[in-house]
Amino acid sequence: MKRVITAVILIPLVLALVFMGPRWHWVFMLATAGVAALAAWEFLGMAEIGGAKPSRIAVLLAIILLFAGNFEWPDQSTTILGMLSLALLVFCTFSSPVERMMPDIAVAIFCLFYTGFTLLALPALHDEANGPSLITFLLCVVWAGDIAALYIGRQWGKHKLIPRLSPNKTWEGTLGSMAGSLLVAGGLIGLASMLETWDSARLSFPEGVWYWLGLAVVVNLAAQVGDLAESGLKRSAGVKDSGTLLPGHGGVLDRIDALLLAAPALWYAQLIHMRF
């Protein structure tokens, strides 16, 4: 019940942010930066269990500067990431004990990339002409895959997927996740066509149906890998959840682990499509 209540509260808030309009893009960017900072805080908490203790303030400041720089110069994201990574290297060199320098530097820079740079794909997608539709597609495909994997895996899951990373995930749940994502993608395309006949442009998917179904496959695969990666990180740290901020869901990192790979996958797929 806690899981359901949390979802009922959060989903409308997220969709409201998505459809606020272009002039409120900065609010979406700010909200994404806040989520990235919360996820980073939880990641650094897990890293401390393994003995790495870089300054949380320094890493969070780097993430905030990453988003601020991207808002001002969106075409210089990798340059800004490189500058901030070097800054964290220098900071940890002079602030960490010698015996802890290597893990501190590695964790700080990886955290900036893992919870910060990956989520830059969200405001980049949102800033596109059909940005709200792209974000809605991304979220619905990921959510549907996650829900389908959970219930199908519990009901029919017998063959373990990768037990060393996530002992509860099964091949049946994985296939169910893919089916759920494809069904929702098809439903979104149908809904967009229906809205178009009513002269409503709230959802827009201009390419062919097979293009979006193909993207749903890419996003689902990336989301499942992202989920497995975070599960492996938690097992490495010896924790069940990354945090307790979201009742019934664990921490923020637990909720966005799939998006950390799915969002960049969708953004890069869009870039490749536009290029070719």
Image (spheres, rainbow, N blue to C red):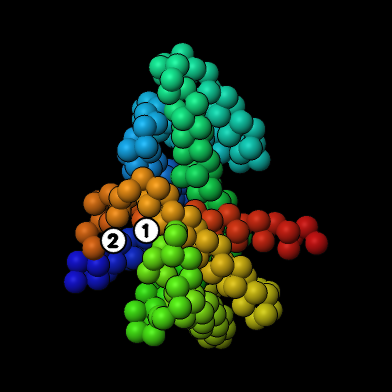
Residue 4 placement, left or right of 146: left
In what element is the residue under mark 1?
Answer: helix
- Tell me: residue 146, above or below residue 56: below
Q: Residue furthest left?
A: 1
- Tell me: residue 144, above or below residue 26: below
Q: Position of residue 175 (x, y in %)?
A: 51, 79
Dot 1 crowding, Cα within 10 Å, few <14, some 14–19, many 20+: some
N-term-proximal mark, 2 vs 1: 2
Q: Amino acid at mark 1?
A: Arg
The residue singled out by tag 1 in the image is: 255
Q: Quadrant of residue 169?
A: bottom left
Q: Position of residue 91 (x, y in %)?
A: 47, 19
Quadrant where the C terminus sits is bottom right
Q: Amino acid at mark 2?
A: His
- Tell me: residue 149, above or below residue 114: below
Identify which residue, 108 or 137, lies in the foreground.
108
Residue 65 at least partly seen: no
Identify which residue, 82 or 159, lies in the foreground.
159
Q: Position of residue 275 (x, y in %)?
A: 78, 57
What is the spatial separation of the Cα atoms under label 2 and label 1, in whole angstroms?
7 Å
Q: Residue furthest right?
A: 276
Q: Quadrant of residue 246?
A: bottom left
Determine the residue positioned at 61% across, 31% down. Answer: 82
Is there a contact, CB below 8 Å, between mark 2 and mark 1? Answer: yes
Quadrant where the N terminus sits is bottom left
Question: How many numbered circles are shown?
Answer: 2
The residue singled out by tag 2 in the image is: 249
Residue 109 at least partly seen: yes
In what element is the residue under mark 2?
Answer: loop
Dot 2 crowding, Cα within 10 Å, few <14, some 14–19, many 20+: some
Q: Position of residue 145 (x, y in %)?
A: 46, 73
Residue 272 placement, left or right of 9: right
